[in-house]
Image: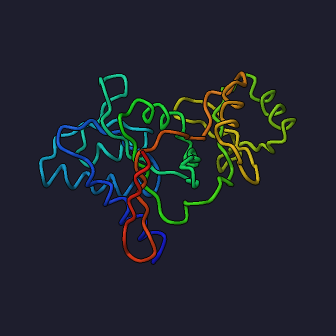
């Protein structure tokens, strides 16, 4: 079963968790694109009455085009459920997010949600987190922060666009990707990073997810209850 098909079945299964009257945080990424499509179908076919809160401008545009009413996170009182993707999920259900440059908005929406579901294909499950870690930083002083990351042994690289310019997030910040072989303790590393002046947010998500939906090789979906 292809990775793309795993994403499709997992994304469409996630749409079934949305109930009438919910305020729904809508995540970012290729798997969530299938969730948005399925959710738009439910809004159109079932007259599903929901409100969406986007984790990126791209998500907001795509969801709105499918007829999902979209609100700003500061315009609502609560978020009932957030459904988002992840770049990696470890055995302790920590995750790395931010490959699509939306980690700050994703974390704001997630931590203001009563419940969180992550939706991934099977390749995203790992024993321990081991891929590059995005860190969102303000432009002012970012060169100094890059030097500090280097001195700390984090092996940083700038996130650049196709023209060689720094990628700008939806909040107009820069991204620095850290390259560590294995992240043994995501909570400790996250605490260390967030205390560095100039760091806006990092892509480590810990102690946040309630359920994980995984598209598997046998044409099925595995729903894991975390908490």
* Residue 54: image location, x then y, percent: 38, 38
Question: Which residue is found at the position 57% from the left and 44% from the top?
Answer: 98
Residue farthest right in this picture: 151
Here the colouring is: rainbow
* Residue 55: image location, x then y, percent: 43, 38
Instruction: Choose between 57 and 83: the one closer to the eye.
Output: 83
Question: Which residue is found at the position 62% from the left and 36% from the top?
Answer: 202
Asked if residue 140 lies left or right of residue 97, the reply is right
Asked if residue 203 lies left or right of residue 225, the reply is right
Asked if residue 87 lies left or right of residue 192, the reply is left
Instruction: Choose between 132 and 189: the one closer to the eye.
Output: 189
Q: Quadrant of the N terminus?
A: bottom left
Q: How many marks?
A: 0
* Residue 74: image location, x then y, percent: 36, 22
Q: Quadrant of the C terminus?
A: top left
Asked if residue 68 lies left or right of residue 197, the reply is left
Q: Quadrant of residue 136?
A: top right
Residue 86 seen anywhere in this rendered image of the structure: yes
Residue 60 seen anywhere in this rendered image of the structure: no
164, above or below 74, in the image: below
* Residue 14: image location, x then y, percent: 33, 55
Instruction: Choose between 8 and 70: the one closer to the eye.
Output: 8
Question: Which residue is found at the position 29% from the left and 23% from the top?
Answer: 77
Instruction: Choose between 133 and 211: the one closer to the eye.
Output: 211
């Amino acid at each position: 079963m292809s990775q793309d098909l795993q994403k499709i079945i997992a994304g469409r299964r996630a749409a079934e968790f949305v109930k009438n009257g919910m305020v729904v945080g809508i995540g970012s990424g290729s798997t969530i694109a299938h969730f948005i499509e399925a959710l738009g179908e439910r809004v159109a076919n079932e007259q599903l009455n929901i409100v969406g809160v986007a984790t990126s401008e791209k998500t907001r545009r795509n969801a709105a085009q499918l007829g999902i009413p979209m609100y700003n996170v500061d315009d609502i009182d609560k978020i009932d459920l957030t459904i988002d993707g992840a770049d990696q999920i470890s055995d302790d259900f920590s995750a790395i997010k931010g490959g699509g440059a939306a980690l700050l908005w994703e974390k704001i929406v997630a931590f203001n949600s009563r419940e969180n579901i992550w939706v991934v294909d099977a390749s995203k499950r790992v024993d321990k987190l081991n891929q590059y870690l995005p860190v969102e930083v303000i432009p002012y002083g970012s060169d100094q922060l890059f030097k500090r990351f280097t001195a700390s042994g984090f092996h940083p690289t700038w996130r650049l666009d196709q023209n060689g310019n720094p990628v700008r997030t939806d909040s107009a910040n820069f991204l620095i990707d850290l390259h560590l072989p294995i992240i043994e303790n995501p909570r400790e590393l996250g605490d260390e990073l967030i205390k560095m002046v100039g760091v806006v947010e990092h892509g480590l998500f810990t102690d946040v997810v309630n359920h994980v939906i995984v598209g598997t090789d046998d044409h099925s979906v595995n729903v894991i209850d975390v908490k």
